Amino acid sequence: MNRKKIKKQFVKFLLRWPMLLMLAKHNPTIIAITGSVGKTSTKEAIYAVLKKRFSVWRSLKNYNTELGIPLAVFGLTITNYSVFSWLGVFIKMMARLIRFSNYPDFLVLELGIDKPGDMAYLLKLVRPEIAVVTAISDIPVHVQFFSGPRDVAREKMRLVKALPPLGVAVLNHDDSAIMEEADKVRAKILSFGFSKEAEVRTDTFEMFGPGPDAGITFKLEHKGSFVPVRLKNVFGKSNVYTALAAAAVGLTLGMNLVEISEAFSEYISPPGRLRLLPGIKNSWILDDTYNASPVAVAAALEVMKNMESKRDIIVLGDMKELGEYSEKAHLAVGDLIFGSIKEIWTVGDSARLIGEQAVRKGFDRKNVYNFEKSEEVGRQLQDHIKSGDLILIKGSQSLRMEKIVEEIMAEPQKAKELLVRQEPSWTRK
């Protein structure tokens, strides 16, 4: 075992026991979220709904692993990952364990996995009573560590299979990989989606933008009752699923549809998740730089396709951790290019395939630009932007695509507030 692994094992041991004692002392109801996409957005939406009535915490940042979850339980963050810093965290944990009395009634956590066995370990740390599974695509992230997509689904579904009989599994009814495993769940199931069979559902949604009032509206339905919902600066079908999942959790805890609809006025999409930002030269930026997977890229392109603009530009980086599916997935994105897209900018060797496939489909080669690193893009892109342009920027986290956004946003002084910040290597996307 190398030094890095020894350090990680030491830190895991250091953090585990204060966390278990804290949970045993205060016994909050734990709501856990997993899935291939949408975990953080769903966590934030659930938090926005529940805080209208309840005392609730949610995990900060992307703290969804064996190291991050203990931090989330104590409401702590860390910026320096040396052993001494972790010892400092341990001391803070012990102090809060002894002194903290005003612990929340509900704790909303993400549970991330990237290899077999991860979920089983996380379930030794926390015992959720409510579990949400957002979506598991045909080519999910981290598939390179599994034999195939169905193995990823089974690993993630361990969460809901571990629920107690009186627990509640909130499941995406429209995702076949999720529903194929649903018959093995002991807990009550509350489904959400666009399907007529979903219990918390909607038929359709409208999207407005770009502009200061941009966002989506839809009718939220449950047991024959309807309420209108408006989400500001939130876009796409994926975010309707996010809201439906959050509404299902609220209904599970006795909230009514009117309360839930009002609570969504407080929901703010996390940085880098299809946020609309003003760009230079009176342009608009769709900042979707947090991460990238095939289903998320397709969703972002669909949002762009349905927005009004004079001209569309896409800046796409590699989709990482796809294993043997990588080439196929990047070529498939090239097939999705639509008419209003006038320029394609790619970052990374795999993303280059997107432009090449688009050219094979008839796209003008002179309007395809390829780069190795995101740092090379921003300044050159500035010269191409015109008033009324809509620029989509998306790529896997390791490419730091938010650096491109910072170069072309109208208010770069707000970058720290509005853009994705680099996550530590021990978080899972």
Image: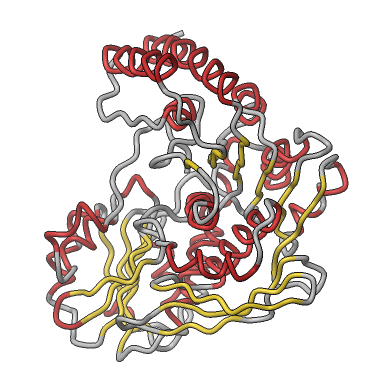
Q: Is residue 212 left or right of residue 192?
A: left
Q: Is residue 369 above or below residue 417?
A: below
Q: Farthest residue in the right direction?
A: 183
Q: Nearer the viewer, residue 111 or 89?
A: 89
Viewer-closest of 332 and 82: 82
Check the image and report above or below for 308 versus 39: below
Task: Using the image, determine if residue 326 lies above or below residue 62.
Answer: below
Q: Percent from the top left, x then y, of residue 350?
A: 41, 55
State the image coordinates of residue 219 (x, y, percent, origin top left).
63, 79
- Which of 232 and 115 lies nearest the eye of the viewer? 232
Identify the residue at horizontal 45%, vertical 68% (top origin).
265
The x, y position of residue 57, in whole percent, is 47, 41
**Residue at 57% across / 64% down in the picture?**
243
Q: Note whether residue 3 is visible.
A: yes
- Which residue: 53% across, 50% down? 39
**Residue drawn at (29%, 15%), measured in percent from left and top?**
88
* Colour setting: secondary structure
Q: Position of residue 377 (x, y in %)?
A: 20, 62
| Residue 112 showing in the rendered view | no
Residue 100 falls left or right of residue 201: left
| Residue 7, quarter of the rendered image | top left
The number of callouts visible is 0
The one of 398 and 43 positioned closer to us in this rendering: 43
